[in-house]
């Protein structure tokens, strides 16, 4: 066959992608079929109905220049150093061409070309699978990172609402409590049997109605309450001796448990905890509503 190399890997090098399809150039097919390039184009010209554009088409001038310039300078030599517009053939176009050329060489060449197209499809398919697998791995890592970030975010949120303070962290503890109080939208209830003037100094910057529930005969003087309300007008004090723990209730629905009376925060280790149990909050509010 005049030293024509029909190895698949060689033919595969003659298969290019143009307009998203795998195609072969008319000049390369002419070499393989041992005919002149014009013979290939004559076959198409004389059998137009057998070569719809999805089987074969001529490159536009822009496509031709870009294609030959960027990737295949050697093709200029085969065309006399001129930018002509080559015709390209898809796999179906090559198969149709073989039926027209009708020769032993054409048959053998066509079989080799078909095998090359199949090999190329397999290679592309495997590459796509590999890329998809890589994409899936990247996506999995992305989800894993997002989940990790979400875990850290939830941990940070939990850390912000459930915190422990050690002896000596007086300022941090006061700052946290003030942040909680300020988050109330319309109403704040504070249950602290040992409430005193220190609590008034905190709530004076809270712009909502405040109810303090504390035990009778406690450290919060009646004069302190009256003086406070002459200026701020947002405080109600109720007395009840049945509470041991300290609670903060925001807007009748958000419940915090505090392990220390406010006048002693920071002196010993204690924690502030957001109570997520809605039933517990409801039960506590039922009791408080009977008091207020």
Image (cartoon, rainbow, N blue to C red):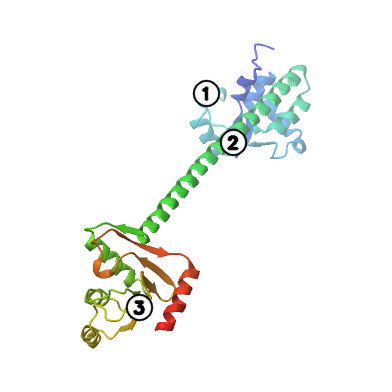
The disc at residue 34 is: none
* Residue matched to label 1: 74
Looking at the rendered structure, the secondary structure element under dot 3 is loop
- The tag earlier along the polypeptide, 1 or 3, is 1
Camera-side residue of 266 and 73: 266
251 or 60, which is in the foreground?
251
Query: Residue at (65%, 30%) from the top-left corner?
Result: 122
Element at label 1: helix
Image position of 97 with respect to 215: above or below:
above
List the residue tagged with mark 3. 241
- Label 1: how many residues lie within 10 Å, few (<14), some (14-19) or many (20+)? few
Disc 2 versus disc 3: distance between alpha carbons?
74 Å
Are the residues flagged by discs 1 and 3 in contact, CB closer than 8 Å? no
Q: Is residue 231 left or right of residue 102?
A: left
Q: Is residue 17 visible?
A: yes
Tell me residue 34's x, y (percent).
68, 18
Report whether 253 appears left or right of 167: right
Q: Nearer the viewer, mark 2 or mark 3?
A: 3
**Mark 2 burial class by Cα count in 10 Å: few <14, some 14-19, many 20+:** few
Q: Characterize the local packing of mark 3: few (<14), some (14-19) or many (20 or more) Cα atoms within 10 angstroms.
A: few
Task: Name the quadrant of the N terminus.
Answer: top right
Question: Mark 1, mark 3: which one is toward the viewer?
Answer: 3
Whether residue 87 appears in this view of the structure is no
Closest to the observer, 41 or 108 = 108
- Specify the label residue 128 is tagged with: 2
The quarter of the picture where the C terminus appears is bottom left
Of residues 44 and 150, the one drawn nearer to the viewer in this rendering = 150
Closer to the N terminus: mark 2 or mark 3?
A: 2
- Say which element carries label 2: helix
Place of residue 141 in the rendered image (x, y in percent of width and height, measured from the top left): 48, 42
Q: Position of residue 20 (x, y in %)?
A: 60, 39
Which residue lies most toward the top here? 2
């Amino acid at each position: 066959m005049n030293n024509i190399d029909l190895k698949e890997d060689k033919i595969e090098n003659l298969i290019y992608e143009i307009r998203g399809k795998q195609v072969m150039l008319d000049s390369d097919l002419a070499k393989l079929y041992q005919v002149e390039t014009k013979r290939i184009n004559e076959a198409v010209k004389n059998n137009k109905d057998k070569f719809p554009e999805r089987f074969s088409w001529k490159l536009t001038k822009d496509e031709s220049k870009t294609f030959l310039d960027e990737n295949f300078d050697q093709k200029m030599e085969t065309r006399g150093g001129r930018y002509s517009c080559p015709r390209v053939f898809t796999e179906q176009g090559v198969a149709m061409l073989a039926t027209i050329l009708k020769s032993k060489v054409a048959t053998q060449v066509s079989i080799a070309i078909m095998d090359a197209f199949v090999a190329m499809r397999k290679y592309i398919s495997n590459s796509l699978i590999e890329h998809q697998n890589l994409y899936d791995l990247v996506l999995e890592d992305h989800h894993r990172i997002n989940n990790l970030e979400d875990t850290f975010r939830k941990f940070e949120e939990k850390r912000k609402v459930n915190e422990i303070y050690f002896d000596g962290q007086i300022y941090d503890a006061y700052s946290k409590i003030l942040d909680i109080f300020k988050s109330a939208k319309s109403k704040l209830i504070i249950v602290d049997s040992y409430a005193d003037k220190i609590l008034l100094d905190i709530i004076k910057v809270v712009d909502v109605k405040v109810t303090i529930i504390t035990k009778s005969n406690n450290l919060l003087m009646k004069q302190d309450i009256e003086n406070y309300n002459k200026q701020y007008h947002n405080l109600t004090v109720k007395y009840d001796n049945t509470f041991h723990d300290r609670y903060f209730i925001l807007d009748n629905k958000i419940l915090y448990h505090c392990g220390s009376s406010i006048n002693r925060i920071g002196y010993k280790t204690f924690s502030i905890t957001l109570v997520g149990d809605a039933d517990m909050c409801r039960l506590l509010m039922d009791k408080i509503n009977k008091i207020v």
